Amino acid sequence: MDIFKSIFLFVLAGLFEIGGGYLIWQWLREGRGIEFAILGAIILFLYGVVPTLQPANFGRVYAAYGGVFIALALLWGWQIDKIAPDRFDIIGASIALIGVFIIMYWPRS
């Protein structure tokens, strides 16, 4: 599988998970309508489907996805909630993304 396609799938899964979770959050914490919960649940279901398109085994995909989620969650908070990541957030996310590349894309013998 092409690395760029794999990265795209990670980002898509992340957007589905964070977006779906955000809609559920809006429903429960902000008093939004039930349609937020329903749409959030549908999007979270799609989050569960997208990682199955990755070529690696379940454990490897979900371990690597954790690093992608860290970075995307900070970006979501920055763009949607207007809370900028600080330097420690950026350092931590960078370390996590290095782990993603080692886990998923480092050549194996």
Image (cartoon, rainbow, N blue to C red):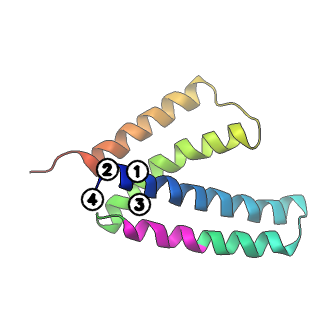
Mark 2: amino acid: Ile
Question: Which quarter of the figure has residue 60?
Answer: bottom left
Residues at marks 3 and 4, CA–CA distance in whole angstroms = 17 Å
Q: Which is more N-terminal, label 2 or label 3?
A: 2
Of labels 3 and 4, the one closer to you: 4
Callout 3–callout 4 Cβ contact below 8 Å: no
Residues at marks 2 and 1, CA–CA distance in whole angstroms = 6 Å
Q: Which is more N-terminal, label 1 or label 3?
A: 1
Residue 73 is tagged as: none
Instruction: Tell me the crowding category of disc 3: few under 14, some 14 to 19, or many 20 or more residues within 10 angstroms, Cα based.
Output: some
Please state the horizontal and vertical placement of residue 38, each as a whole percent of the image.
75, 76
| Rendered residue at 63%/26% (across/down) | 86
Callout 2–callout 1 Cβ contact below 8 Å: yes
Residues at marks 1 and 4, CA–CA distance in whole angstroms = 10 Å
Circle 2 SS class: helix
Mark 4: amino acid: Met
Callout 4–callout 2 Cβ contact below 8 Å: yes
Q: Name the residue under label 2.
A: 3
Residue 57 left/right relative to 46: left
Judge whether residue 4 is colored magenta. Answer: no
Mark 1: amino acid: Ile
Q: Name the residue under label 1.
A: 7
Q: Name the residue under label 3.
A: 62
Residue 54 left/right relative to 8: left
Of labels 3 and 2, the one closer to you: 2
The stretch in magenta equals: 45-53
Mark 3: amino acid: Tyr
Of labels 3 and 1, the one closer to you: 1
Q: Name the residue under label 4.
A: 1
Instruction: Tell me the crowding category of disc 4: few under 14, some 14 to 19, or many 20 or more residues within 10 angstroms, Cα based.
Output: few
| Rendered residue at 51%/71% (across/down) | 48
